[in-house]
Amino acid sequence: MKNLTLEDIADLAGVSRSTVSRVINNQDSVSQKARKRVMEVIQDTNFHPNAAARTLASQRSWTIGLVLPLSVSIFFTDPYYPNLTRGIAQACNQNNYTLTFFLVGSKDEEKNMYPRIARKGFLDGVMVQAGHHGDQDIIGTMIDMNIPMVVVGRPFRSDNVTYVDIDNVNSSYNAVSHLIRIGRKRIATITGPIKSTVGMDRLEGYRRAIVERNLPYDPNLVVEGDFTEPGGYYAMQKILAQKPDALFAASDVMAMGAMRAVKDANLRIPEDIALVGFDDLPMSSYSSVQLTTIRQPVVQSGIRVVETLIDMIENGIEKPLHIIMDTELIIRDTCGANRRSVNLK
Amino acid sequence: MKNLTLEDIADLAGVSRSTVSRVINNQDSVSQKARKRVMEVIQDTNFHPNAAARTLASQRSWTIGLVLPLSVSIFFTDPYYPNLTRGIAQACNQNNYTLTFFLVGSKDEEKNMYPRIARKGFLDGVMVQAGHHGDQDIIGTMIDMNIPMVVVGRPFRSDNVTYVDIDNVNSSYNAVSHLIRIGRKRIATITGPIKSTVGMDRLEGYRRAIVERNLPYDPNLVVEGDFTEPGGYYAMQKILAQKPDALFAASDVMAMGAMRAVKDANLRIPEDIALVGFDDLPMSSYSSVQLTTIRQPVVQSGIRVVETLIDMIENGIEKPLHIIMDTELIIRDTCGANRRSVNLK
DNA sequence: ACTATTTTTGGGAGCGCTCCTAATTTACCC
DNA sequence: GGGTAAATTAGGAGCGCTCCCAAAAATAGT
């Protein structure tokens, strides 16, 4: 069975190639009669125009890419990424774009992946998860290739780049302020990787809250984590030696690890250690003592990223946009306060 | 800056379009001299051939798709999928294929996604996660469109389809047999969705082990779960009323929920309830009492799926293959036996 | 009825490659 | 050096669309 082409449909419908093309692209200036006839034939033959030919002729692929650089693939243990992906996929479907997926697994792969991502006639635009120094490579490549790009998370050099992020500094400032308000004095933190913007910013929020309330800033209470559960566990073991009365964990996954360490040390949450996490993963509410945390709108961020990118593709690139999504403090059990939620600016 | 084409490179290198094409496609019968010259120019100009044009001319896109149908997007809470995706992405990179991602979010989306997936000039082949009745639609569409396909997990109608799966019946048979061997008498199970092949098969393995050892098959000890943590929790609450002394959970995530229910009921694991899960997620070993479970090679399955598909694409489709990956019983704390691991056929 | 518009239609050119064939160059051998 | 075979090269045709422009058909206006 030979592949059908526009021309075949045209013959069957007794019109020209151009008319069929107009019908398919839903353009006007086609007579009712012709349109109806063509649509029938398309139905009957189950015809779908060849994607490559369309892309070549129109210079548009209706496909966008999501790049998860090396720095990210390590944290693939964090449900944050599946959720982000879900938002992105959903928005792509909604807008009739196709999503292609680049998961960089090793330094070697980067070399030949980046040009492949940016080559012409393939993607209309690109989303890059970033926030580590290593991510500047891919961002630079995309800028050089002049392909529309939206970055997820604030990259290190962000001036000429459109990105979607939350206000990490302010969010964690609020998380820690809450712990102080409740009366805790020795508040520790498990940070994200300190070479990442998320890690830095959430630590900065912690620092500001501490300093602003005239609590002593004790470096022994600050331990770097890696956004994994075991990472949180080991970090918390170190911290426990310092006799803290509260903890701000820069992610829920690390908070889970920390909780485990606290339990293993036979201490109680929140009585001995009050705890606030970050992310509001579904699993944060799957326990008898539920986690107080900062909720960030992961799925919505994904949607926003796609919408922003599509806007850039279809309406041209204006000046770089910095889009900040709202967060919320969800007060549950682990901080010891009464349950409620607080919108953060 | 105009886009470079093959012809431009040819001019710059003082050869013809064809020669440049040969160099790019790494074909022989190009003189050393010409090849060197062309490669230099390609380097200097940072040229990459247009993907759409290549696809149109060669009828190959070097792109494959992963379809997660509606039935799957519900379980996106299970780390199984991120891991599978990781294996798939890794194998794609290795083989220089690009991965596109179709996450079906709603019944409505299906309608216009399936033809889009199968349209010509777009994908060389497709991977479909399946195992529910609802997945027959997409499988049927792909077969009709005659596009190479590998299914992940055994679909309901599997005769004419190539798929990669594990032996679910035998694996859970072994899990339950282990509990029996240890001396447990009232063994309960939380199943997967019973309308899925995984759900059915793992239950069947449970049944066989019970019956074969002449234990009574008590329907009250069988509760359907949904592969989520809260699902496992509620299922276990029901089961606890039946005073079991062991549980086989059809997934680790549900096992986690079950453990939480057991703790909330002030019972001990493994003393009061012995527990075996299924999957061996990393998190299964992140607790003070670590989970005994069936390890399935998720990442490797992903790799195998891709390799099988590429083979079909490049070497044509032979008869349908049914590829079964090995599993392993990982004995840790929750069953009460001595830690070790047992390869399953 | 006969222009003057407007709406609809058809076909050429072109998107940037690959593949094929034929022409050219080079290598080889007596 | 001349003839043959082998290696290399060039360019045409074609992949299946979109876009543009000119031609044809329908409609309007007087």
Image (cartoon, coloured by chain):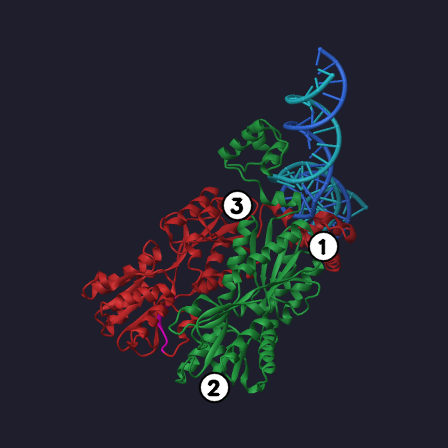
Chain colours: A red, B green, C cyan, D blue
Spot occupied by residue B288 in the image (x, y as percentages of width and height)? 37, 73
Where is the C terminus of chain A found, in terms of image quarters? Answer: bottom left
- Name the residue located 58 percent from the left edge and 31 percent from the top edge: B10
Whether discs 1 and 2 lie on one chain: the answer is no
Q: Dot 1, crowdedness within 10 Å: few (<14), some or many (≥20)?
A: few
Name the residue beneath numbered marker 2: B240
* Residue A338 vertical position relative to residue A153 in the rendered view, above or below: below
Spot occupied by residue A122 in the image (x, y as percentages of width and height)? 56, 47
Q: Quadrant of residue B302?
A: bottom right
Real-space Cα separation, disc 1 to disc 2, in angstroms? 70 Å
Name the residue beneath numbered marker 3: A116
Residue B152 visible to the viewer: no
* Magenta segment: A289-295
Q: Dot 3, crowdedness within 10 Å: few (<14), some or many (≥20)?
A: some
Three-letter code, disc 1: Ser
Front position in the image: B37 or A131:
B37
A311 magenta-colored: no
Chain hosting mark 3 = A
Chain hosting mark 2 = B
Q: Quadrant of residue A154?
A: bottom left
Real-space Cα separation, disc 2 to disc 3, in angstroms? 55 Å
Spot occupied by residue A1 in the image (x, y as percentages of width and height)? 77, 52
Q: Which circle marks residue A31 in the picture?
A: 1
Three-letter code, disc 3: Arg
Spot occupied by residue B325 in the image (x, y as percentages of width and height)? 58, 63
